[in-house]
Image (cartoon, coloured by chain):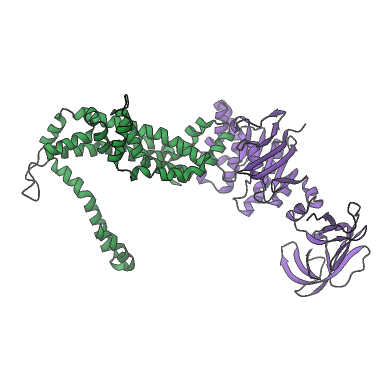
Chain colours: A green, B purple
Amino acid sequence: MAKSRSTPAHASNKKVRSSGWQIFMVGSFLFYMLVPIISTYIFSVATRWDRTILPEGFTLEFYKRAFAASYFTITLRNSLILSVATVLVSLLVIVPTVYWIHTHLPGAKPLLDVLMILPFGIPTVVLALALVQVYNFPPLARSPYLLIGAVVVYSMPFMYRPVSNAIQAVDAHVLTEAGQSLGANIFQVLSRIIIPNILPGILSGSLLVFSTVFAEYTLTSLIVGARFKTFPLLLVEFTRINGNVASAFSVISFTIAWLASILILWIGTKGQTAKTESLRAR
Amino acid sequence: MAYLELKNVTKSFASTPAVRDFTLDIEKGSLVSFLGPSGCGKTTTLRMIAGFEQLDTGTIQLDGSDITTMPPNRRDIGMVFQAYALFPNMTVRENIAFGLQMKKTSKMEIKKRVDAVLEMVRLQDTAKRYPHQLSGGQQQRIALARALAVEPRVLLLDEPLSALDAEVRVVLRGEIRRIQSELAITTVYVTHDQEEALSISDKVVVMNKGFIEQVGTPEEIYRAPNTRFVATFIGTANQFYGVVTGKDSVDCTNIKLSVEDLNDFSNGQSVVVLVRPENIQVQSKQPKLNNWNIMQGEIETITFHGAITRLGANVSGQRVVADITVANTEAVSLNQKIWLSFPSDACQVMAVNE
């Protein structure tokens, strides 16, 4: 990373050599980003990989063991429940709030901006322990509901930013008034005008929240632990038993996150086919 | 009883008054402009008629019923915004159909109405396009068509031409007036452009600092301004400050003016005499005219405006502007001594209350 930071200045000064530097820069960056992922993939199908540069042999054995693990399906299900629930709650809370702030309380926007940085500032361990202490009564105490509430807070900035930017870009205030003057009530304004126009922001927010929550470990482990075991918990458990199986779990986790992303994007573009042009214009 | 009535309407934003004691009757089918500098309360008043701002005090009545607290989507009042505000996710046809869909109009009827208003704004071939594929002028025509499609009781236009090129502005304001007269739709038009207001309105409401300065036909507003603000805001007026010294004369330090009918003023009262530049004649020799104000000055500025040329002259330290046409004057040059003359009935006298 240090290298890639110092190079752009050189690259822009000497145009002749810039292409070589650029290739080197982009190459190093890709190497830095991809090596862990590629090695995880290889490790999940490698027989033995500690005495040689390349694995000694390949096998699907670890995937068999991964799929056979007693908690495999249930943790996957729990993770999906958690991620989907968090995305839904986040959408229900963030979209109307941001819309209302932009159209009726623009003065409160800076406050909201600051508020949305806070989750980054509080260590998750502190957040988890504080929540466990405060909500120590049923039905909330150490329940999946408390967990969903906690992850919603933790992942909120990922939903807030794209949605807020999208609402800003479409001038929601004027569009709302235009809709109202044509006889639309607030729900019709939201469903027919505002949401379709900020859909790209909603989709990217949902994607970010989904993948963040799908890989969430600290909050889950501290708030619910074994009561509501999610996929990352199972994965961490297996790193202590067998690294190869843990790698197989990682690969499965990646794949699910990617499939979910593609699914969300597909749903988005399906409702937008004719409208891509109008969105690109912005 | 008038169709749209505003009674004693006031509105403040964070203790800054925006509209003060605004009372106005608007006749059915007429086009009324709110004209004034920015911050005069014209847009706020329009937004209160639309229902986007709540009144502090006062009432608004439409067609005999009180709409003061009615939510905007139930008022049946169409609006055209400065920023067009077309829905970017919808085609032109969908944009125009939106209001009709909200009214649960049948599909057949919607198609008929959309085609009709598209024809009215002469943009039939854009039905399938998206707003961003249209020029600014076209977008505003579609916004007008969208507002008209639902056949609203009142049409509000909030500086609809401000974002457009000068050329498009002139064409489109003609179009707006044509369509408005064709449909005989009651219209309120907000603008800060006096030429726009004077050229398309049945009545002009000149506003300043939240107050109505004057309501009148465009000609009344121009020829007989009630206040100094109106006289100087609409067109240009020379201002001579002085005191009343008789029943037909005003003494302005170095210049003595003879004016008509000072019955409403008392001797020694401070007044300002307003004279429009087009009412001042310019000659190189001293003219012999009875009852005219005649003064000598030196040309300081010459500004070419096309049909007229505006001269700025120094008359004993007072700056006086006069308009000349090519036909009625000889060539003029800077620092030239000229004679300026205007009849006493071209002077309008107003009290100065400082």
Kindly tell me whether residue A271 is visible in this rendering.
Answer: no
The image position of residue A249, as x and y in percent, is 18, 36
Q: Which residue lies furthest to the top in this view?
A: A139
Describe residue A100's horizontal placement relative to residue B300 as left or right: left
Tell me which residue sits at (56%, 36%) in the image. Answer: B96
Residue in the foreground of this view, choosing between A131 and B55:
A131
Give the quadrant of the N terminus of chain B. Answer: top right
Describe residue B151's horizontal placement relative to residue B309 as left or right: left
Give the quadrant of the C terminus of chain B. Answer: bottom right
Residue in the foreground of this view, choosing between A34 and B124:
A34
Describe residue A226's horizontal placement relative to residue A82 as left or right: left
Tell me which residue sits at (22%, 34%) in the image. Answer: A231
The image position of residue A24, as x and y in percent, is 24, 60
Residue in the foreground of this view, choosing between A217 and B30:
A217
Tell me which residue sits at (25%, 59%) in the image. Answer: A2
Count of numbered tags: 0
Location of residue B298 (image quadrant): bottom right
Location of residue B15 (image quadrant): top right
The image position of residue B128, as x and y in percent, is 51, 39
Tell me which residue sits at (22%, 49%) in the image. Answer: A34
Kindly tell me whether residue B93 is visible in this rendering.
Answer: yes
The image position of residue A16, as x and y in percent, is 30, 68
Location of residue A118 (image quadrant): top left
